[in-house]
Image: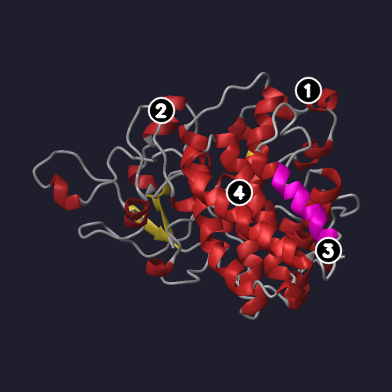
Amino acid sequence: MLGYISSTRKKSCYACVKAKRRCDLGYPFCKRCGIKGYDCKYPNATPRDNFKASSHVPAEVVVRQTTPDLVPLASVDLFDPFFFQTSDSSGSTSSSSSEALDDFQLQDGWIIENPRPMPRTPLTRMLVPEIAVPSFLSEAQTLFVIRSLISLVPAMAFNGTTTFLHRHLYQTHEPQAYQDCVALSALYLSKTARTESILVKSMTAKISSMINEAPTWTLPQHLAAVQALIIYQIIRLYDPTLNLHAEAVAHNTLLQHWSAQLWKRAFDEPQPFESDYASWVFHESLRRTIMTSVFVRCGWSCLTRGGYAEQVPVLARLPVTKDLEAWDCAREEWDVRSLSILGEEENLMTYGDMGGSWSHDRSVEGMDPFAKMLLAACRGEDDPRLLV
């Protein structure tokens, strides 16, 4: 349940005004602020009671039903990336997770109207598109997502890269967490009854080491740690022969927490890069890492709860690069793609928008594996080609 600022009293949010960009008036924040991680504030979006002694007229906040409310608001994970709002360019302070939750609660004095017919806006301009993002995945969708996740382990072992870790990400420096992850992935693929205990103890030791070192991480080290934990979680959650489910389920909370912290740091701690390409490689790897970390937990939820995708409200709002084919292109080709010309905002859309823009006349041949996993999860039921 989200809202928008009534068109009768509409005024763009401060961030869009400052950037001279069009604001879609989404509430509690517009799409641009949601993607960029800004504090989204409207000039008059405050309770009417505060204006009794003022000549200003408060904006009307109109409730609009978009995606289903899958769980009671109080039970939504506060550590998920969607609930982190970082400071904007004007230097306002960050909102805490509890403050972000308060933004979704209706306050006394707000004027609430029943939903009324509105002109349909393009899907790509809406904070949460009016599409059916599934709250339950079919068995075929669940199995496809889990197989896609499992395939990341051999990719890490053989190539040192995955669909969420670009091959050029660690060219100049390889964090320790990344080196350990590649080594343990290779050990897992070659494990025997004799080496299985070594594998289990090594993963436990590496995770404990990362927990101890977490306070001192740089942002690249933090990214590498989340990527490593994703691989360790896939191995432990989805290989029943290791009997590590209990420990892995407990560490789902750790993965959730680290991912949310990583997402927030990405906005708060700008990094220096030698080129636009290097910047894109880092930030696209980070976006895909966040998405995959949620998919790992979502896959486990579907597997153990009859297909129930608990993380849908978070997934629908996470940003995805429109040009997913750029991931595997050569540097020279990347330089002439729109990614190198347009700004970040123009190159991103929400995962919900991505699912809504899919049509059955589009080809699935040679599709980026990451894109196929995303589309299989939200459109695989009505387009079985995505599950092959």
Image location (x, y in percent) of residue 346: 62, 33
The answer to whether one can see residue 317 in this image is: no
Q: Using the image, determine if residue 256 lies above or below residue 247.
A: above
Counting other residues with Cα less than 10 Å from the Cα at mark 3, is it few (<14), some (14-19), or many (20 or more)? some
**Residue drawn at (41%, 71%) of the image:** 72
| Helix, strand or loop for disc 4 | helix
Structural distance between the alpha carbons of marks 2 and 4: 27 Å
3 or 4: tag closer to the N-terminus: 3
| Helix, strand or loop for disc 1 | loop
Image location (x, y in percent) of residue 150: 77, 62
| Helix, strand or loop for disc 3 | loop
Quadrant containing the N terminus is: bottom left
Question: Which portion, as a residue range, is magenta?
Answer: 179-189
Question: CB under 8 Å between callouts 3 and 4?
Answer: no
Counting other residues with Cα less than 10 Å from the Cα at mark 4, is it few (<14), some (14-19), or many (20 or more)? many
Structural distance between the alpha carbons of marks 3 and 1: 42 Å
**Residue annotated with mark 4:** 226
Closer to us: mark 2 or mark 3? 3
**Residue annotated with mark 1:** 335
Structural distance between the alpha carbons of marks 3 and 4: 24 Å
Q: Which amino acid does label 3 sit on?
A: Lys
Question: CB under 8 Å between callouts 2 and 3?
Answer: no
Structural distance between the alpha carbons of marks 4 and 1: 29 Å
The answer to whether one can see residue 11 in this image is: yes
**Residue annotated with mark 3:** 191
2 or 1: tag closer to the N-terminus: 2
Q: What residue type is labelled 4?
A: Val
